[in-house]
């Protein structure tokens, strides 16, 4: 099961989908009409999504498409510019992704990054060869001619490289702008053709002037207005929701996670009481979260909300079950039943709100929302025969942009910055054993102590996730001169940008000591606390 499917919003599915697989690349993402945009073509690079995000941070909307999408589809989006991403292939390999020559004749500026630069050089007659020594990681860039991309930037600057093939000679009519430790031509340009190439990766933090290079391309070459922001689409999406729904009834499976919360609040802003949110509390949430969801949406925002206390129902279904995948399937199936029962009471609801993000669109196919809900969607893996028309107001946004929208529309900071949480909840953090009421309450209390101390230390927003794991293991201890036989609590805290990779967080020793001390003193059943220091890869963020 991929890490993506362990996220919030009750995602309970089992199918992995490759990040480069696009099912319907012909459906443009809806964006405000007055916003300039560029297209990023993905050639399989590990940083392709990051390029799209960095472009947006410059104030320009970006759409990431597969490299084989075709020149007609690129042109249909009317972009102000085109960026060709990096990739792992060699331009000389028989099965390497190719560059459609017509893309260079669209009359819009083109920027090739890494493999994208090599494709441009190869297509236009430059010399690309495998170097004797690869260039991976930090390198030194020497700018000989600033051109447009390096205007006002230092002649010597660090950059991040990831390649073995190298451009040794630019195409005829191109000016070589820079070299690096192992690359004789690390950047080139043709002002006449408005085609540019850089061998390094401007999108990563290890290239300190990378955002300046992207800004020069977007502003000075493409002429983009730099007016894109996540908050700028709020009114546009409200108008789209009203046009789509009309006077129809809408339901939303509200989890309390960031995505579903922002989506629900946007839809309520648009259509008011035509929306009914269904919140299913399966008894496996973090401490007090169920009450917070009800208080925020029903009491504060006055959103019509059906809150279902289904803890006993889920616990009964989980009795005697310890295998994690079976837990997921049981929780997912039971969630579907509860949701169906409550949605049916709304009466003639034709629309379903989903907190689908742009990263989900990229990873699961890129197409428009189908009228039949597929298993990879957010609400519990709803079945194929449960038919709604999807309302997906966030499908053009990355996670950080969703948080910006949440702040813009007044969602409380505690919910805007809530860390990702698995749909099956604490049940899959009870490892190797049954998710009993006793164990769930113990894990909930341990997790509450962890979150309380991390927040008090001012570190909560620095972490991608922080949580506790309760293995079905007991160990011997000594408390008050007496032998104890208690549970082990595992602390897991990681830093990440997107959960594709993650590093274990270096929490201060005194903070760890305080957390362990509180758990052992406040939780009678716990006599040992340990720290998980595994990165992803080789591990995953969640244990199961």
Image: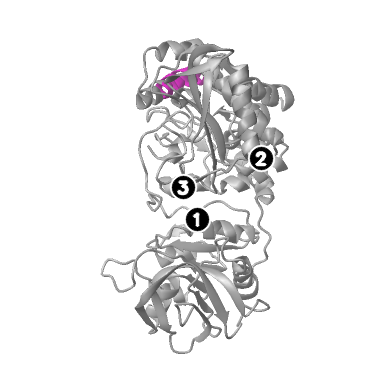
Percent across and percent down for residue 244 are 57, 40
Closer to the eye: label 3 or 2 = 2
* Residue 49: assigned label: 1
* Residue 276 located left or right of residue 363: right
Residue on which the image places disc 2: 459
Q: Residue reaching furthest front? A: 481
Label 3 secondary element: loop
Whether the residues at callouts 1 and 3 have beta carbons within 8 Å, the answer is no
Closer to the eye: label 1 or 2 = 2
**Mark 3 burial class by Cα count in 10 Å: few <14, some 14-19, many 20+:** some
Q: Residue reaching furthest left? A: 94
Label 2 secondary element: loop
Q: CA distance from mark 3 to mark 2?
A: 21 Å
Give the mark nearer the N terminus: 1 vs 3: 1
Identify whether 527 is placed above or below 222. Answer: above
Magenta stretch secondary structure, dominant: helix
Percent across and percent down for residue 136 are 44, 67
Residue on which the image places disc 3: 500
Percent across and percent down for residue 298 are 68, 22
* Residue 503 located left or right of residue 453: left
Residue range (magenta): 331-344
Identify whether 157 is placed above or below 290. Answer: below
Give the mark nearer the N terminus: 1 vs 2: 1
Q: CA distance from mark 1 to mark 2?
A: 26 Å
**Mark 1 burial class by Cα count in 10 Å: few <14, some 14-19, many 20+:** many
Q: In terms of image quadrants, where is residue 158?
A: bottom right
Q: Is residue 379 visible?
A: yes
**Mark 2 burial class by Cα count in 10 Å: few <14, some 14-19, many 20+:** few
Residue drawn at (63%, 58%) of the image: 57
């Amino acid at each position: 099961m991929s890490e993506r499917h362990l996220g919030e919003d009750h995602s309970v599915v089992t199918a992995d989908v490759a990040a480069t697989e696009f099912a319907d690349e012909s459906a443009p993402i809806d964006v405000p009409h007055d916003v300039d945009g560029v297209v990023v073509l993905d050639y399989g690079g590990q940083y392709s999504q990051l390029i799209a995000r960095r472009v947006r941070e410059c104030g320009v909307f970006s759409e990431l498409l597969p490299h084989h999408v075709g020149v007609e589809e690129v042109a249909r989006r009317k972009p102000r510019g085109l960026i060709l991403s990096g990739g792992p292939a060699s331009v000389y390999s028989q099965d390497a992704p190719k560059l459609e020559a017509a893309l260079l004749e669209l009359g819009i500026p083109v920027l090739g990054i890494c493999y994208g630069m090599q494709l441009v050089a190869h297509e236009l007659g430059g010399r690309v060869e495998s170097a004797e020594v690869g260039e991976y990681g930090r390198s030194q860039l020497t700018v000989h001619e600033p051109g447009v991309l390096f205007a006002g930037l230092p002649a010597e600057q660090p950059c991040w490289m990831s390649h073995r093939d190298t451009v040794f000679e630019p195409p005829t009519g191109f000016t070589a702008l820079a070299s690096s430790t192992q690359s004789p031509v690390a950047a080139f340009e043709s002002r006449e053709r408005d085609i540019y190439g850089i061998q390094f990766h401007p999108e990563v933090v290890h290239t300190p002037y990378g955002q300046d290079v992207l800004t020069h391309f977007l502003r000075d070459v493409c002429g983009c207005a730099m007016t894109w922001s996540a908050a700028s689409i709020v009114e546009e999406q409200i108008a789209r929701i009203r046009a789509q729904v009309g006077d129809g009834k809408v339901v939303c499976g509200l989890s309390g996670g960031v995505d579903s919360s922002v989506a629900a609040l946007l839809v309520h802003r648009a259509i008011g009481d035509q929306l009914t949110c269904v919140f299913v509390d399966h008894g496996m949430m973090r401490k007090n979260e169920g009450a917070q969801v009800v208080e925020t949406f029903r009491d504060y925002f006055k959103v019509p909300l059906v809150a279902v206390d289904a803890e006993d129902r889920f616990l009964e279904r989980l009795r005697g079950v310890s295998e994690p995948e079976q837990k997921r399937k049981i929780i997912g199936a039971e969630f579907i039943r509860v949701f169906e029962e409550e949605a049916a009471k709304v009466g003639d609801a034709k629309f379903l709100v989903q907190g689908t993000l742009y990263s989900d669109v990229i990873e699961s196919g890129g197409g428009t929302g189908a009228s039949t809900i597929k298993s990879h969607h957010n609400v519990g893996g709803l079945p194929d025969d449960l038919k709604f028309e999807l309302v997906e107001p966030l499908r053009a946004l990355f996670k950080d942009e969703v948080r910006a929208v949440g702040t813009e529309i007044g969602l409380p900071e505690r919910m805007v910055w809530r860390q990702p949480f698995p749909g099956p909840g604490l049940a899959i953090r009870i490892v190797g054993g049954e998710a009993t009421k006793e164990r769930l309450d113990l894990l909930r209390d341990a997790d509450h102590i962890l979150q309380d101390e991390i927040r008090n230390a001012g570190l909560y927003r620095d972490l991608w996730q922080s949580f506790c794991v309760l293995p079905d293991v007991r160990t011997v201890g000594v408390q008050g001169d007496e032998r104890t036989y208690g549970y082990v609590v595992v602390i897991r805290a990681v830093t990440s940008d997107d959960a594709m990779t993650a590093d274990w967080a270096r929490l201060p020793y005194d903070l760890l000591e305080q957390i362990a001390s509180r758990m052992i003193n406040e939780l009678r059943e716990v006599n040992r606390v340990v720290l998980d220091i595994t990165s992803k890869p080789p591990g995953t963020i969640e244990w199961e």
